[in-house]
Amino acid sequence: MAENILEVRHLKKYFKTGSGMLHAVDDISFDLQEGRTLGLVGESGCGKSTTGRSILRLIEPTSGEIFFQGKDITKLSKGQMRHVRKDMQIIFQDPFSSLDPKKTINQIISEPIRVNRILTDKHAIEDRVLELMETVGLAERLINSYPHELDGGRRQRIGIARALAMRPKLIVCDEPVSALDVSIQAQILNLLKTLQEKMHLTYIFITHDLSVVNHFSDEIAVMYLGSIVEKAPAEELFNNPIHPYTCLL
């Protein structure tokens, strides 16, 4: 049996608002085994994206414990987190807004490699960028193109290549296909599935669309108003949903 790569315990994230405290994530717990996919599903505003970003500490949790590879990362300093983040990456929802429009594909994909000094030789970095481009299905001739010159599917492939640059073990996919045409969605989902099998990646796949995660996830957790109201293997959840909110979705 695979080991847990991630264990989340009583995670909370509250925001101060003019009308009081907003309980965006309200005491959720779950485990995720290495090499598997957890689908995190719910309507906009249910707290699923906040959950993903809190797990990566892109936003700081209010309380709770997040064990990644057995280590509670909520207790790590910012410097220590920089080392951990090599193993934890994110693919954002909108590839256009998450990519720097002033940088070429080469610069975007190579940036995490250079900043973290994974490679220092210029030719080795370019070889790695070309390797990543080939891995995600981007033609070599596009290496000096800018994001605005490409369609949404290719832009999302850049985002995936950038996430893979650090050779991560866990990737949070935050609505990675919702901004794409339906015809391109299937291509990106198939790519993510192939990469998972090839590289033994672990995914948290965040979406509002149950049909997208049906065949993609091993387990699905349904979120409502900051809480997980139901969690089950994907097939079981579809064949026998228990919570009324799951039935509505």
Image (cartoon, rainbow, N blue to C red):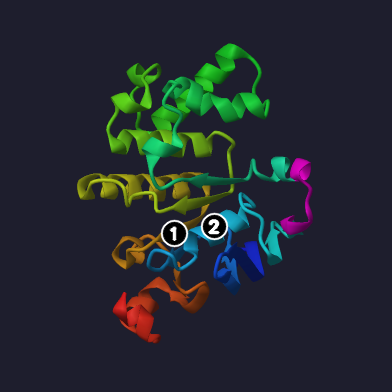
Q: Of all residues shown, which one is farthest toward the left?
A: 183
Q: Residues within 10 Å of mark 2 (few under 14, many from 20)?
A: many
Q: Quadrant of residue 21?
A: bottom right
Q: Which residue is mark 2?
A: 52
With respect to residue 147, does 47 lie above or below?
A: below
Q: Residues within 10 Å of mark 1 (few under 14, many from 20)?
A: many
Q: Is residue 143 magenta?
A: no
Is 26 left, or right, of 184 in this rendering? Answer: right
At label 2, which amino acid type do we have? Answer: Gly
Instruction: Classify mark 1: helix, strand or loop.
Output: strand
Q: Which residue is mark 1?
A: 206
Q: Which residues are magenta?
A: 73-80
Question: Which comes before the other along the chain, label 1 or label 2?
Answer: 2
Determine the main secondary structure of the stretch shown in magenta.
Answer: helix
Instruction: Classify mark 2: helix, strand or loop.
Output: helix
Q: Residue at x 69, y 56 (%)?
A: 69
Q: Position of residue 202 (x, y in %)?
A: 53, 54
Q: Position of residue 111 (x, y in %)?
A: 56, 26
At label 1, which amino acid type do we have? Answer: Ile
Q: Are marks 1 and 2 in contact (CB under 8 Å)?
A: yes
Distance CA(mark 1)–CA(mark 2): 8 Å
Q: Quadrant of the N terminus?
A: bottom right
Q: Residue at x 27, y 50 (%)?
A: 186
Q: Position of residue 7 (x, y in %)?
A: 65, 66
With respect to residue 37, does 21 lie above or below?
A: below
Q: Quadrant of the C terminus?
A: bottom left
**Which mark is drawn over residue 96?**
none
Q: Residue at x 33, y 17 (%)?
A: 141
